[in-house]
Image: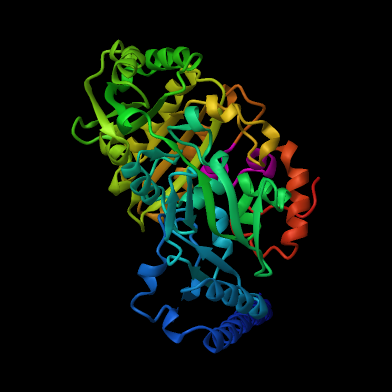
Amino acid sequence: MLPLIAPISFFALIAVCRSVGAAAAQASSSQSKIDTLLDCLHRNIPTSSIITPANTNFVNDSIRWTTLAAPSYSVLVNAGSEEDIATSIQCATQSNVTFLATGPRHGYSITLDSVQNGLEINTAFLDHLSVDPDANTLTAGGSVTFGQAIDALYPIGKEMPTGSCSCVGLLGGSLGGGVGRLSGLHGLVLDSLISVRLMLPNTTIITASKTENADIFWGIGGAGFNFGYVLNATYRIYDQVPNGLHLNADFKFPISQVQSYYERLDKMAKSQPKELSILTLFNYDADLNETIITANAVYAGPEADGRAAVQFLFDQNPLISNITSVPWINLLDTVGFGFTGPAICKRGNRRSQWVIGVNRLDPDAYTTASGIFQDMITRYPATLDSSIDVQLLPTQGIIAVPDNEAAYPWRSLIAHVLLEFKYTDAQLDGIVDGYARRIRDVIVRTAGTAGLNVYVSYSHGDETLEEIYGKQKLGRLAKLKKMIDPEGLFDAYHALPTAYP
């Protein structure tokens, strides 16, 4: 039998050599593309704006909110002008290097890891905003955050719908839809969008609105990241609720109350006031050393009306309750005992995010989901900072807008169930994914929807096109994609097809 060993080893060695040779050739080709890219950039952009991994600022200028499935870069351009952005896109395209234009770097999806050894175009300089209180408009650059918009509007007695975290990009949040606590009064964030200045994949800059490039404007509202980079946008703003004060009510309940709690919540959801939003979490509480239900209710109106609206939560006999009137400018850092404050905005953690859109809250399903969640954090204590967040947001302002006004497909949903897993060990990725899918399957079975409905800005990235964009919207979106970005230059985040079906 010995003579047979040599030929097998010989062919195995050839296979290994070929594999090593192919890898070396691929690496050489990749480096050649980067060299071509760098040459192009250095000829057209200030050298001080171009950095590589050897630069001490590289990590700080590229680190994202989550490290899970993050893109990787061989070159980073800190753009200082719109011309720098255009030149960077042109150089990357000519060099056949993938790229990603970034702002606050808070967007999440496992699809982002399609950018490997690419170019990051950092647009942090687009952090300017201006407000015209007489015209009731706010114009913001592509890197402005929700927090910056609130800071600008509150002192002049104005408001607009925002997301739930201050560090998320205003424009980035808008392009997916933009769900938040003021949706009952003002709709989605995108519903306040008046116009955008958009740099197309070919680096032409256009204005899009309901009267100019209207088809593109339609697509921007729900899938805008597929069509280029929004340099700035103008929004409609509104007079603040009286005195700019919101009733904030925080509660902690024992997990044993999950069934009765969701019976109350489901009943309330059927007549939810347009001023009231409720976020409910399953989370581990370090002070109590147990898994609990944390609830936050915000009422955008008079305190007396707010207290009446949240009385059903007091009737649930909370372990702890706290109710205060909070200025809008401080609201996002206050809600949920500070749950969405600065700590949640910290970059560089490993986070895995999943979502299910629902039209009803089935108490049995959430009881089962809480059990699966408790099993996970008990077996794997490294996941203790995880949570299940049920965002029950008022829908009156959302459904007041006709469905055909924008690409956003899920106006009828009453809540978004956000699964947020936080941990540090990459070896837990598969385990966390398994628990996430189990919980998602439980919730979607009783969601009252036709299958899985997914808000794109919260999506994990494993969902189908129909589950993210809605079958009824995909045909028109695909035609837009083919017209604007047939080469798929802006495909890193939930890419659209160029034909459907």
Rendered residue at 77%/55% (across/down): 498
Rendered residue at 45%/39% (across/down): 160
Task: Examine the rendering and report whether any part of residue 85 can be seen.
Answer: yes
Q: Nearer the viewer, residue 62 or 175?
A: 175
Is residue 471 shown left or right of residue 247? right
**Looking at the image, residue 66 lies above or below residue 467:** below
Q: How many marks?
A: 0
Query: Residue 371 at what x, y percent from top left?
Result: 40, 26
Query: Residue 82 at what x, y percent from top left?
Result: 54, 71
Occupied quadrant, residue 66? bottom left
Query: Residue 430 at what x, y percent from top left?
Result: 48, 48
Does the magenta segment cover residue 461?
A: yes
Occupied quadrant, residue 196? bottom right
Is residue 43 shown left or right of residue 367? right
Query: Residue 228 at what x, y percent from top left?
Result: 63, 61
**Looking at the image, residue 346 lies above or below residue 256:** below
Quadrant of the frame with the C terminus: top right
Rendered residue at 45%/50% (across/down): 429
Is residue 496 shown left or right of residue 271? right
User: In this picture, which residue range is highlighted in magenta?
Assistant: 454-469
Q: Which residue of the protein is positioned furthest toward the front in this rendering?
A: 134
Does the magenta segment cover residue 152?
A: no
Task: Examine the rendering and report whether any part of residue 108 can be seen.
Answer: no
**Looking at the image, residue 132 lies above or below residue 393:** below
Is residue 85 shown left or right of residue 333? right
Question: Coloring scheme of the render?
Answer: rainbow
Quadrant of the frame with the N terminus: bottom right
Q: Nearer the viewer, residue 108 or 127?
A: 127
